[in-house]
Amino acid sequence: MNEFTGLCAAVASLMALTCWARSVPTRAWGDGSPAPRRAWAVALATVVLQVLTATAAAGLAAGVALVVAAWMVLGWLLVLAMNQWPTASLQWARRLGALGGAGCVLALAWHFFFQA
């Protein structure tokens, strides 16, 4: 169960990364059309959700390290994918990010209601 929770916490960063990439002018996705405040809010909410989930699964130090590593690695991979396949990478990053976020919510619910 902890491996699934850690995976969900890592993949959830794609939610915020796609929102952030759409809010700044990038070569692949864009025009910077959504508001930067929304991107900051989504990024902050995602980090809080990730840290809570990863901390519940692995402890404070490991949880924070997992979140930082997920943002660095998945951000780098997303930039590479954006430059090669802009449309497909946007669609899949959104889908995977939503699945990761849903998995985080389910894992937190499981932890707080059934494990505590």
Image (cartoon, grey):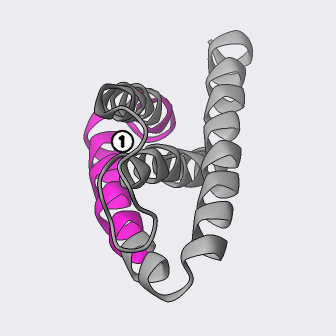
Is 2 above or below relative to 115? below
In the rendered image, which quarter contains the C terminus?
top right
Instruction: Classify mark 1: helix, strand or loop.
Output: helix
User: In this view of the protein, which residue sits in the foreground, 11 or 39?
Assistant: 39
Q: Main secondary structure of the magenta part?
A: helix
**Image position, residue 113 (x, y; %):** 71, 11
In the visual, does 10 lie left or right of 95? left
Q: Residue at x 52, y 45 (%)?
A: 15
The span picked out in magenta is 52-77
Is 16 above or below relative to 80? above
Badge 1 local density, few (<14 within 10 Å), some, or many (20+)? many
Q: Residue at x 51, y 37 (%)?
A: 57
In the visual, does 89 lie left or right of 44? right
**Image position, residue 102 (x, y; %):** 70, 35
Q: Residue at x 59, y 61 (%)?
A: 93
Pointer 1: what residue? 63
Which quadrant of the view contains residue 46?
A: top left
Q: Is residue 11 magenta?
A: no
In the visual, does 57 lie left or right of 103? left
